[in-house]
Image (cartoon, rainbow, N blue to C red):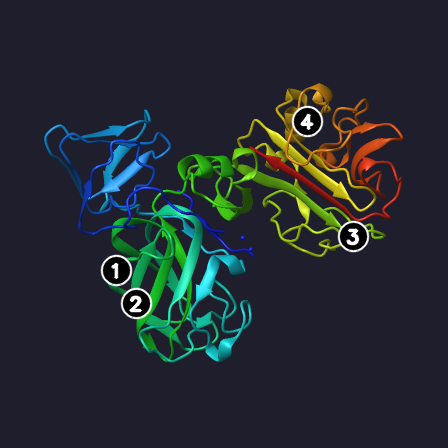
Protein backbone atom coordinates (compact mmCIF):
# COMPACT_ATOMS: atom_id res chain seq x y z
CA UNK A 1 0.00 0.00 0.00
CA UNK A 2 1.13 3.56 -0.57
CA UNK A 3 1.91 5.68 2.46
CA UNK A 4 0.96 9.23 1.52
CA UNK A 5 2.47 12.23 3.24
CA UNK A 6 1.80 15.42 1.32
CA UNK A 7 3.28 18.80 2.19
CA UNK A 8 2.17 21.99 0.54
CA UNK A 9 1.10 25.42 1.16
CA UNK A 10 -3.18 27.15 2.12
CA UNK A 11 -8.25 27.51 3.24
CA UNK A 12 -13.04 27.07 6.77
CA UNK A 13 -15.70 26.08 9.35
CA UNK A 14 -18.53 23.55 9.66
CA UNK A 15 -21.18 22.72 12.22
CA UNK A 16 -22.17 19.11 12.71
CA UNK A 17 -25.81 18.35 13.26
CA UNK A 18 -26.50 15.39 15.56
CA UNK A 19 -25.28 14.33 19.00
CA UNK A 20 -23.83 17.10 21.14
CA UNK A 21 -20.60 15.29 22.08
CA UNK A 22 -17.72 15.04 19.68
CA UNK A 23 -16.20 11.64 20.45
CA UNK A 24 -16.75 9.43 23.44
CA UNK A 25 -14.60 6.85 25.14
CA UNK A 26 -17.55 6.17 27.40
CA UNK A 27 -21.20 5.47 26.68
CA UNK A 28 -23.70 7.40 24.63
CA UNK A 29 -27.46 6.93 24.51
CA UNK A 30 -29.01 7.36 21.09
CA UNK A 31 -32.66 8.36 20.98
CA UNK A 32 -32.97 9.77 17.47
CA UNK A 33 -35.58 8.32 15.16
CA UNK A 34 -34.41 10.28 12.14
CA UNK A 35 -31.27 9.76 10.08
CA UNK A 36 -28.12 10.40 12.03
CA UNK A 37 -25.76 12.80 10.28
CA UNK A 38 -22.65 12.52 12.42
CA UNK A 39 -20.89 9.40 13.78
CA UNK A 40 -19.33 11.52 16.53
CA UNK A 41 -20.18 9.37 19.56
CA UNK A 42 -19.62 5.92 18.17
CA UNK A 43 -15.96 5.58 19.08
CA UNK A 44 -17.10 4.48 22.54
CA UNK A 45 -20.21 2.43 23.34
CA UNK A 46 -23.49 3.31 21.67
CA UNK A 47 -26.77 2.37 23.35
CA UNK A 48 -29.74 2.41 20.98
CA UNK A 49 -32.82 2.58 23.16
CA UNK A 50 -36.16 0.78 22.91
CA UNK A 51 -38.35 2.07 20.10
CA UNK A 52 -35.61 4.02 18.38
CA UNK A 53 -33.91 3.50 15.03
CA UNK A 54 -30.60 5.13 14.22
CA UNK A 55 -30.03 5.28 10.46
CA UNK A 56 -26.49 5.72 9.22
CA UNK A 57 -26.51 7.59 5.87
CA UNK A 58 -25.20 5.64 2.88
CA UNK A 59 -22.13 7.82 2.48
CA UNK A 60 -20.68 6.68 5.83
CA UNK A 61 -19.25 3.40 4.57
CA UNK A 62 -17.57 2.43 7.83
CA UNK A 63 -18.77 3.25 11.32
CA UNK A 64 -16.45 2.67 14.27
CA UNK A 65 -17.48 1.77 17.83
CA UNK A 66 -16.15 -0.40 20.62
CA UNK A 67 -19.62 -1.72 21.31
CA UNK A 68 -23.22 -1.18 20.21
CA UNK A 69 -26.06 -2.27 22.50
CA UNK A 70 -29.75 -2.49 21.69
CA UNK A 71 -32.69 -2.18 24.09
CA UNK A 72 -36.02 -3.72 23.12
CA UNK A 73 -36.79 -2.84 19.50
CA UNK A 74 -33.85 -0.46 19.09
CA UNK A 75 -32.27 -0.81 15.65
CA UNK A 76 -29.23 0.33 13.69
CA UNK A 77 -29.80 0.69 9.94
CA UNK A 78 -26.79 0.84 7.60
CA UNK A 79 -28.13 2.50 4.46
CA UNK A 80 -25.25 1.82 2.09
CA UNK A 81 -24.82 -1.55 0.42
CA UNK A 82 -21.17 -1.61 1.53
CA UNK A 83 -21.66 0.06 4.92
CA UNK A 84 -20.42 -1.85 7.94
CA UNK A 85 -19.61 -1.58 11.62
CA UNK A 86 -15.92 -1.85 12.50
CA UNK A 87 -14.51 -2.07 16.06
CA UNK A 88 -12.89 1.24 16.98
CA UNK A 89 -9.81 -0.67 18.12
CA UNK A 90 -9.19 -1.95 14.57
CA UNK A 91 -6.32 0.19 13.32
CA UNK A 92 -4.80 0.52 9.87
CA UNK A 93 -1.29 -0.90 9.83
CA UNK A 94 -0.21 1.54 7.13
CA UNK A 95 -2.24 4.73 7.67
CA UNK A 96 -1.93 7.69 5.31
CA UNK A 97 -0.72 10.92 6.89
CA UNK A 98 -1.74 14.51 6.22
CA UNK A 99 0.45 17.53 6.95
CA UNK A 100 -0.31 20.49 4.72
CA UNK A 101 1.64 23.69 5.14
CA UNK A 102 -1.15 26.22 4.59
CA UNK A 103 -1.70 28.67 7.41
CA UNK A 104 -5.40 27.93 7.72
CA UNK A 105 -4.66 24.30 8.60
CA UNK A 106 -2.79 25.36 11.75
CA UNK A 107 -3.29 27.10 15.07
CA UNK A 108 -0.91 27.46 18.02
CA UNK A 109 -1.91 29.24 21.21
CA UNK A 110 1.71 30.36 21.67
CA UNK A 111 4.81 30.61 19.47
CA UNK A 112 8.36 31.42 20.55
CA UNK A 113 8.95 35.21 20.38
CA UNK A 114 5.46 35.48 18.82
CA UNK A 115 6.70 34.72 15.31
CA UNK A 116 4.16 34.58 12.50
CA UNK A 117 3.22 31.54 10.46
CA UNK A 118 6.00 30.18 8.19
CA UNK A 119 8.63 32.11 10.17
CA UNK A 120 11.34 29.99 11.76
CA UNK A 121 9.58 29.00 15.00
CA UNK A 122 6.18 28.49 13.39
CA UNK A 123 6.85 25.94 10.64
CA UNK A 124 4.86 23.04 12.14
CA UNK A 125 4.31 20.72 9.15
CA UNK A 126 6.24 17.49 8.67
CA UNK A 127 9.71 17.81 7.13
CA UNK A 128 9.71 21.60 7.44
CA UNK A 129 13.11 23.27 7.82
CA UNK A 130 12.61 23.90 11.55
CA UNK A 131 9.30 23.30 13.39
CA UNK A 132 6.91 24.81 15.91
CA UNK A 133 8.39 26.00 19.20
CA UNK A 134 6.05 26.91 22.03
CA UNK A 135 6.22 30.24 23.81
CA UNK A 136 7.78 28.59 26.87
CA UNK A 137 10.07 25.62 27.34
CA UNK A 138 7.22 23.47 28.68
CA UNK A 139 4.34 24.80 30.77
CA UNK A 140 1.78 22.05 30.10
CA UNK A 141 -0.73 24.42 28.47
CA UNK A 142 0.95 25.43 25.19
CA UNK A 143 -0.49 23.48 22.26
CA UNK A 144 -0.36 22.99 18.51
CA UNK A 145 -3.54 22.25 16.55
CA UNK A 146 -4.26 20.90 13.05
CA UNK A 147 -7.49 21.43 11.08
CA UNK A 148 -8.41 18.63 8.64
CA UNK A 149 -11.07 20.92 7.07
CA UNK A 150 -13.76 18.27 7.52
CA UNK A 151 -14.51 15.66 10.18
CA UNK A 152 -12.54 12.48 9.47
CA UNK A 153 -11.75 9.18 11.12
CA UNK A 154 -8.44 9.86 12.91
CA UNK A 155 -6.19 6.99 13.98
CA UNK A 156 -3.24 8.86 15.44
CA UNK A 157 -0.48 11.36 14.77
CA UNK A 158 3.00 11.37 13.27
CA UNK A 159 5.61 13.69 14.80
CA UNK A 160 9.18 14.91 14.46
CA UNK A 161 11.34 17.11 16.65
CA UNK A 162 12.86 20.44 15.70
CA UNK A 163 14.95 20.01 12.56
CA UNK A 164 17.87 22.27 13.40
CA UNK A 165 18.26 21.86 17.15
CA UNK A 166 18.14 19.13 19.82
CA UNK A 167 14.57 19.84 20.89
CA UNK A 168 11.57 17.49 20.74
CA UNK A 169 8.41 16.42 22.54
CA UNK A 170 8.74 13.10 24.37
CA UNK A 171 5.09 12.75 25.43
CA UNK A 172 1.84 14.64 24.90
CA UNK A 173 -1.87 14.79 25.50
CA UNK A 174 -3.98 14.57 22.32
CA UNK A 175 -7.53 15.93 22.03
CA UNK A 176 -9.95 15.71 19.10
CA UNK A 177 -12.98 17.86 18.25
CA UNK A 178 -15.54 18.19 15.48
CA UNK A 179 -16.39 21.82 16.23
CA UNK A 180 -13.31 23.38 17.92
CA UNK A 181 -15.45 23.82 21.06
CA UNK A 182 -16.17 20.40 22.54
CA UNK A 183 -13.05 18.25 22.98
CA UNK A 184 -12.47 14.59 23.74
CA UNK A 185 -9.14 13.16 24.86
CA UNK A 186 -7.81 10.61 22.41
CA UNK A 187 -4.62 9.95 24.40
CA UNK A 188 -3.72 11.34 27.83
CA UNK A 189 0.02 10.60 27.69
CA UNK A 190 1.16 9.47 24.24
CA UNK A 191 4.85 8.56 23.95
CA UNK A 192 6.47 10.48 21.08
CA UNK A 193 9.97 11.37 19.87
CA UNK A 194 13.48 10.55 20.99
CA UNK A 195 15.41 12.65 18.46
CA UNK A 196 15.05 15.61 16.11
CA UNK A 197 14.15 14.07 12.77
CA UNK A 198 12.87 10.51 12.99
CA UNK A 199 9.15 10.32 12.23
CA UNK A 200 7.28 8.68 15.11
CA UNK A 201 3.96 7.10 14.10
CA UNK A 202 1.71 6.98 17.17
CA UNK A 203 -1.73 5.35 17.20
CA UNK A 204 -4.56 6.14 19.60
CA UNK A 205 -6.24 3.23 21.37
CA UNK A 206 -9.44 3.95 19.42
CA UNK A 207 -10.24 5.40 16.03
CA UNK A 208 -11.57 8.90 16.72
CA UNK A 209 -13.92 11.12 14.72
CA UNK A 210 -12.99 14.78 14.42
CA UNK A 211 -11.90 17.70 12.35
CA UNK A 212 -9.44 19.32 14.79
CA UNK A 213 -6.50 17.52 16.41
CA UNK A 214 -4.75 19.28 19.30
CA UNK A 215 -1.42 18.20 20.82
CA UNK A 216 -0.33 19.54 24.22
CA UNK A 217 3.28 18.64 25.14
CA UNK A 218 3.74 16.96 28.53
CA UNK A 219 7.34 15.82 28.44
CA UNK A 220 10.02 17.54 26.36
CA UNK A 221 13.72 17.38 25.61
CA UNK A 222 15.23 20.86 25.65
CA UNK A 223 12.08 22.76 24.62
CA UNK A 224 8.51 22.06 23.48
CA UNK A 225 9.32 21.95 19.75
CA UNK A 226 7.85 19.67 17.10
CA UNK A 227 6.56 19.01 13.61
CA UNK A 228 3.27 17.16 13.21
CA UNK A 229 0.91 15.31 10.87
CA UNK A 230 -2.38 13.44 11.33
CA UNK A 231 -2.82 9.70 10.65
CA UNK A 232 -6.15 8.94 8.99
CA UNK A 233 -7.86 5.58 9.43
CA UNK A 234 -9.61 5.75 6.05
CA UNK A 235 -8.29 7.99 3.32
CA UNK A 236 -8.93 6.21 0.04
CA UNK A 237 -10.91 9.18 -1.22
CA UNK A 238 -10.21 9.87 -4.88
CA UNK A 239 -11.76 13.28 -5.39
CA UNK A 240 -13.32 16.29 -3.71
CA UNK A 241 -16.69 14.83 -4.67
CA UNK A 242 -15.99 11.65 -2.71
CA UNK A 243 -14.94 13.74 0.28
CA UNK A 244 -18.19 15.70 0.07
CA UNK A 245 -20.29 12.54 -0.20
CA UNK A 246 -18.56 10.88 2.75
CA UNK A 247 -18.28 14.02 4.88
CA UNK A 248 -21.20 16.32 3.98
CA UNK A 249 -19.98 19.05 6.35
CA UNK A 250 -16.67 19.40 4.53
CA UNK A 251 -15.69 23.01 3.83
CA UNK A 252 -13.76 24.76 1.05
CA UNK A 253 -10.02 24.25 1.31
CA UNK A 254 -7.00 22.11 0.58
CA UNK A 255 -7.35 18.34 0.96
CA UNK A 256 -5.32 15.25 0.11
CA UNK A 257 -6.84 12.92 -2.49
CA UNK A 258 -5.56 9.75 -4.13
CA UNK A 259 -7.05 9.49 -7.64
CA UNK A 260 -6.56 5.73 -8.03
CA UNK A 261 -6.79 4.77 -4.35
CA UNK A 262 -4.09 3.48 -2.03
CA UNK A 263 -3.53 0.37 -4.16
CA UNK A 264 -2.87 2.31 -7.37
CA UNK A 265 0.40 3.59 -8.77
CA UNK A 266 -0.55 7.28 -8.91
CA UNK A 267 0.52 9.12 -5.79
CA UNK A 268 -1.72 11.11 -3.49
CA UNK A 269 -1.74 14.86 -4.02
CA UNK A 270 -2.91 18.04 -2.39
CA UNK A 271 -5.81 19.71 -4.17
CA UNK A 272 -8.19 22.60 -3.66
CA UNK A 273 -11.83 21.60 -3.12
CA UNK A 274 -14.82 23.87 -3.65
CA UNK A 275 -17.39 22.33 -1.31
CA UNK A 276 -19.96 25.10 -1.79
CA UNK A 277 -20.69 25.93 -5.45
CA UNK A 278 -23.54 23.97 -7.03
CA UNK A 279 -23.58 21.44 -4.19
CA UNK A 280 -19.79 21.28 -3.85
CA UNK A 281 -17.37 18.46 -4.57
CA UNK A 282 -15.37 20.34 -7.24
CA UNK A 283 -11.63 19.70 -7.69
CA UNK A 284 -9.53 22.53 -9.16
CA UNK A 285 -7.45 21.38 -12.16
CA UNK A 286 -6.63 24.68 -13.91
CA UNK A 287 -5.88 28.02 -12.24
CA UNK A 288 -4.35 31.08 -13.94
CA UNK A 289 -4.56 34.52 -12.30
CA UNK A 290 -2.76 36.67 -14.86
CA UNK A 291 -1.59 40.29 -14.56
CA UNK A 292 -2.22 42.53 -17.56
CA UNK A 293 0.70 43.54 -19.80
CA UNK A 294 2.61 40.38 -18.86
CA UNK A 295 2.90 37.18 -20.86
CA UNK A 296 4.23 34.47 -18.53
CA UNK A 297 4.64 30.86 -19.60
CA UNK A 298 2.08 28.26 -18.61
CA UNK A 299 2.88 25.45 -16.20
CA UNK A 300 1.88 21.96 -17.32
CA UNK A 301 1.39 19.77 -14.25
CA UNK A 302 1.87 16.02 -14.61
CA UNK A 303 1.91 14.95 -10.97
CA UNK A 304 0.23 17.73 -8.96
CA UNK A 305 -2.79 20.00 -9.11
CA UNK A 306 -2.91 23.79 -8.83
CA UNK A 307 -4.14 25.22 -5.54
CA UNK A 308 -6.13 28.39 -4.85
CA UNK A 309 -4.92 31.59 -3.25
CA UNK A 310 -6.03 35.02 -4.45
CA UNK A 311 -9.05 35.46 -6.71
CA UNK A 312 -8.62 39.20 -7.31
CA UNK A 313 -7.97 40.54 -10.79
CA UNK A 314 -4.67 42.39 -11.02
CA UNK A 315 -2.75 39.94 -8.84
CA UNK A 316 0.20 38.26 -10.54
CA UNK A 317 0.50 34.61 -9.52
CA UNK A 318 2.79 33.54 -12.35
CA UNK A 319 5.72 32.97 -9.99
CA UNK A 320 3.74 30.69 -7.68
CA UNK A 321 4.83 27.05 -7.68
CA UNK A 322 1.52 25.97 -6.16
CA UNK A 323 -1.29 28.12 -7.61
CA UNK A 324 -0.25 28.68 -11.24
CA UNK A 325 -0.79 25.90 -13.77
CA UNK A 326 -3.01 23.17 -15.19
CA UNK A 327 -3.16 19.38 -15.24
CA UNK A 328 -2.16 17.81 -18.55
CA UNK A 329 -4.34 15.09 -20.14
CA UNK A 330 -2.16 12.14 -19.07
CA UNK A 331 -2.56 13.24 -15.44
CA UNK A 332 -6.13 14.47 -15.64
CA UNK A 333 -7.35 11.12 -16.93
CA UNK A 334 -6.25 9.54 -13.62
CA UNK A 335 -9.07 11.38 -11.84
CA UNK A 336 -12.69 10.17 -11.81
CA UNK A 337 -15.08 12.86 -13.09
CA UNK A 338 -18.13 13.33 -15.28
CA UNK A 339 -18.52 17.12 -15.12
CA UNK A 340 -16.39 20.17 -15.88
CA UNK A 341 -16.91 23.69 -14.54
CA UNK A 342 -15.48 26.77 -16.27
CA UNK A 343 -14.94 30.14 -14.61
CA UNK A 344 -13.41 33.24 -16.15
CA UNK A 345 -13.31 37.02 -15.78
CA UNK A 346 -11.25 39.90 -17.15
CA UNK A 347 -10.47 43.54 -16.44
CA UNK A 348 -11.66 44.39 -19.97
CA UNK A 349 -15.40 44.08 -19.19
CA UNK A 350 -17.85 42.90 -16.55
CA UNK A 351 -19.09 39.66 -18.09
CA UNK A 352 -18.30 36.43 -16.24
CA UNK A 353 -18.00 32.92 -17.62
CA UNK A 354 -19.43 30.42 -15.14
CA UNK A 355 -21.00 27.19 -16.33
CA UNK A 356 -20.78 23.42 -15.98
CA UNK A 357 -20.98 20.76 -18.66
CA UNK A 358 -21.03 16.99 -19.09
CA UNK A 359 -20.49 17.27 -22.84
CA UNK A 360 -18.83 14.00 -23.88
CA UNK A 361 -16.57 15.62 -26.49
CA UNK A 362 -15.23 18.13 -23.97
CA UNK A 363 -14.58 15.48 -21.32
CA UNK A 364 -12.77 13.28 -23.82
CA UNK A 365 -10.74 16.17 -25.26
CA UNK A 366 -9.39 17.28 -21.92
CA UNK A 367 -8.58 13.72 -20.85
CA UNK A 368 -6.78 12.80 -24.08
CA UNK A 369 -5.70 16.04 -25.75
CA UNK A 370 -7.27 14.71 -28.95
CA UNK A 371 -10.54 15.97 -30.44
CA UNK A 372 -12.42 19.14 -29.54
CA UNK A 373 -15.30 20.66 -27.55
CA UNK A 374 -17.94 20.36 -30.26
CA UNK A 375 -21.43 20.37 -28.76
CA UNK A 376 -20.67 22.41 -25.64
CA UNK A 377 -22.68 25.38 -26.96
CA UNK A 378 -25.93 23.47 -26.40
CA UNK A 379 -24.82 21.16 -23.61
CA UNK A 380 -24.13 23.27 -20.53
CA UNK A 381 -25.78 24.71 -17.41
CA UNK A 382 -25.23 28.33 -16.44
CA UNK A 383 -24.18 28.77 -12.80
CA UNK A 384 -24.37 31.71 -10.38
CA UNK A 385 -23.04 34.92 -11.91
CA UNK A 386 -22.78 33.64 -15.48
CA UNK A 387 -23.29 36.56 -17.90
CA UNK A 388 -20.94 35.71 -20.78
CA UNK A 389 -21.74 34.95 -24.42
CA UNK A 390 -19.64 31.78 -24.25
CA UNK A 391 -20.30 28.92 -24.41
CA UNK A 392 -23.66 29.56 -26.11
CA UNK A 393 -22.06 31.59 -28.90
CA UNK A 394 -19.31 29.03 -29.53
CA UNK A 395 -19.00 28.12 -33.19
CA UNK A 396 -15.29 27.34 -33.55
CA UNK A 397 -12.85 25.01 -31.82
CA UNK A 398 -9.11 24.50 -32.10
CA UNK A 399 -8.51 20.75 -32.12
CA UNK A 400 -5.88 18.22 -31.02
CA UNK A 401 -3.87 20.51 -28.77
CA UNK A 402 -2.47 17.87 -26.44
CA UNK A 403 -1.13 19.33 -23.19
CA UNK A 404 -2.64 22.77 -23.92
CA UNK A 405 -6.11 21.48 -24.78
CA UNK A 406 -7.70 23.46 -21.93
CA UNK A 407 -5.83 26.69 -22.71
CA UNK A 408 -5.41 27.16 -26.46
CA UNK A 409 -8.83 28.35 -27.66
CA UNK A 410 -10.85 25.19 -26.99
CA UNK A 411 -14.01 27.28 -27.62
CA UNK A 412 -14.55 30.62 -29.39
CA UNK A 413 -16.53 32.63 -31.93
CA UNK A 414 -13.93 33.82 -34.39
CA UNK A 415 -12.84 37.44 -33.90
CA UNK A 416 -15.48 38.00 -31.20
CA UNK A 417 -15.58 35.86 -28.04
CA UNK A 418 -12.71 33.59 -26.96
CA UNK A 419 -11.46 31.39 -24.11
CA UNK A 420 -7.70 31.79 -24.35
CA UNK A 421 -4.95 31.30 -21.79
CA UNK A 422 -1.77 32.41 -23.54
CA UNK A 423 -3.58 31.26 -26.65
CA UNK A 424 -1.42 31.41 -29.74
CA UNK A 425 1.45 32.23 -27.40
CA UNK A 426 0.37 35.80 -26.54
CA UNK A 427 -3.39 36.08 -26.06
CA UNK A 428 -5.18 36.15 -22.69
CA UNK A 429 -8.92 36.35 -23.42
CA UNK A 430 -12.18 35.85 -21.53
CA UNK A 431 -15.33 36.15 -23.64
CA UNK A 432 -13.69 38.82 -25.82
CA UNK A 433 -11.06 39.41 -28.54
CA UNK A 434 -8.34 41.90 -27.50
CA UNK A 435 -5.82 39.80 -29.45
CA UNK A 436 -3.08 40.52 -26.87
CA UNK A 437 -2.08 40.18 -23.21
CA UNK A 438 -2.99 43.71 -22.09
CA UNK A 439 -5.84 42.79 -19.72
CA UNK A 440 -5.70 41.12 -16.34
CA UNK A 441 -7.53 37.79 -16.59
CA UNK A 442 -8.59 34.89 -14.38
CA UNK A 443 -9.31 31.38 -15.67
CA UNK A 444 -10.34 28.29 -13.70
CA UNK A 445 -11.46 24.78 -14.65
CA UNK A 446 -12.85 22.35 -12.08
CA UNK A 447 -13.84 18.67 -12.29
CA UNK A 448 -16.52 16.67 -10.44
Seen from the viewer's position, the closer of residues 435 and 19 is 19
- The answer to whether residue 126 is seen in the rendering is no
Of marks 4 and 1, which one's residue comes earlier in the chain? 1
Label 2 belongs to which residue?
Answer: 172
Of the pair 181 and 227, the residue shown nearer to us: 181
Mark linked to residue 291: 3
Q: In terms of image quadrants, where is residue 350?
A: top right
Res. 365 mark: 4
The residue carrying pointer 1 sits among few (fewer than 14), some (14 to 19) or many (20 or more) residues within 10 Å by Cα, namely: some
Q: Earlier in the sequence, mark 3 or mark 1?
A: 1
In the image, 234: left or right of 11? left
Q: Which residue is mark 1?
A: 187
Depth check, mark 2 against mark 3: the one in front is 3
Tell me, yes or no, whether the two marked residues, 4 and 2, touch with CB atoms within 8 Å: no
Looking at the picture, does residue 103 appear above or below residue 340? below
Residue 102 in picture, x, y percent from top left:
53, 58
Label 2, residues with CA under 10 Å away: few <14, some 14-19, many ≥20: many
The image shows residue 393, relative to residue 432, as above or below, that is above
- Marks 2 & 3, CB-CB < 8 Å contact: no
Mark 3 packing: few (<14 Cα in 10 Å), some, or many (20+)?
Answer: many
Which is more toward the observer, 74 or 167?
74
Amino acid sequence: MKRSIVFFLLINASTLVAQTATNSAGSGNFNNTSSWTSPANLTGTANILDGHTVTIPANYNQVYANKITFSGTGKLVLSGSTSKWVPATNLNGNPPAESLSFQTNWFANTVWVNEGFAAAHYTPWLDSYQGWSAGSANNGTDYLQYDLKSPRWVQGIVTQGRANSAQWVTSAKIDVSTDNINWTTAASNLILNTDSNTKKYSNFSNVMYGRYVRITPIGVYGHASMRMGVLLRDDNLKSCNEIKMNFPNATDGVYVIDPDGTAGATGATACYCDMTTDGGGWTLVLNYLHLGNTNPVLVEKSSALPLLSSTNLGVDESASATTWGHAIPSYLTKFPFTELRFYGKTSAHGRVIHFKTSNANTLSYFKTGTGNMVGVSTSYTALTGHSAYLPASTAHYIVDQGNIAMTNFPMYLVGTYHWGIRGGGVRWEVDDFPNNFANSTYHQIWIR
